[in-house]
Amino acid sequence: MKNLFLVSIIMFSFMQIIYAAPSKAEAEVAIAFEKYFDARANQNWDAVASMESASGTYNSNSDGSFHKALSKTTAAQWKASGQAGALNIYYPEFAELSDDVVYVRFYYEGIAINGSKQSDYRTKVTQNWIKENGKWVVKTQHYAPAQFGGVHITVASDFEE
C-alpha cells in the first residue's frame, strides 16, 4: 500500500510537469498570435505589419530558398501580396525559450487564394516571437509543406454549410 501511495505521488508530480500552465510570456504570445492571424484573415495589413519586428523579420519557406535576407514588410507590401483565402490554425504550441523569446509551432491549413488562383494549402509553421519595446512581435517565420500521407486535402466544399 505504501508503494502504491508513493507511485501515485510520483505520477501526479509527473503529470503536473507535463500539463503545466503556460508561462506569462506564452500566454501573452498566444493572445498576440491570435490577433496577428485574425488580422491576416481580415486583410488588416496595417495591423499585420505592426505586429512584426520593427527591425525586420526573417521569413523562409522550404522551397529551396531557405536563407532569405532580413525583411521589413510594410502594410502596402502585404496588400500587394494578394494573399487571401480561408486558412485555419491547428495545434498551436507555445514554448518560452528565454526572457522575451517564445517559440511557436502549428499547422496552417485551408484554401489559399492568390489573385485568381485558388489551391489547397497545408503547411507546418514555426515562428519566434520577441518582446520589442514592451510588445510581442513576430521575428522569424518558417513555412514547410505538410502534404504527407493519410491527410485530408482541403477543398472549397469543406467550408460550405
Image (spheres, helix red, strand yellow):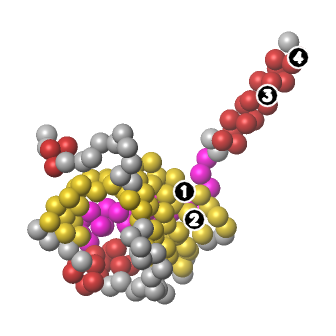
Looking at the image, residue 153 sits to the left or right of residue 66; the answer is: left
| Image coords of residue 110 (percent x, y) | 27, 53
Residue 109 spot, x, y in % from top left: 32, 53
Which residue position holds label 4? 2
Q: Indicate the amino acid at tag 2.
A: Val
User: Of residues 65 and 24, which is closer to you in this image?
Assistant: 65
Residue at x-position 56% and y-position 74%: 131
Please determine whether, in this image, residue 63 is positioned above or below residue 145: below
Q: Residue at x 62, y 56 (%)?
A: 23
Prevalent SS, magenta region: helix
Asked if the magenta segment contains residue 19, the reply would be no
Tell me if label 1 and label 2 are in contact, CB under 8 Å: yes
In the structure shown, which secondary structural element does the residue marked by tag 2 occupy?
strand
Contact (Cβ within 8 Å) of mark 2 with mark 3: no
Query: Considering only order in the chain, which callout, 3 or 2, is on the residue closer to the N terminus?
Result: 3
Disc assigned to residue 102: 2
Q: Nearer the viewer, residue 104 or 60?
A: 60
Q: CA distance from mark 4 to mark 2?
A: 42 Å
Residue at x-position 55% and y-position 73%? 130
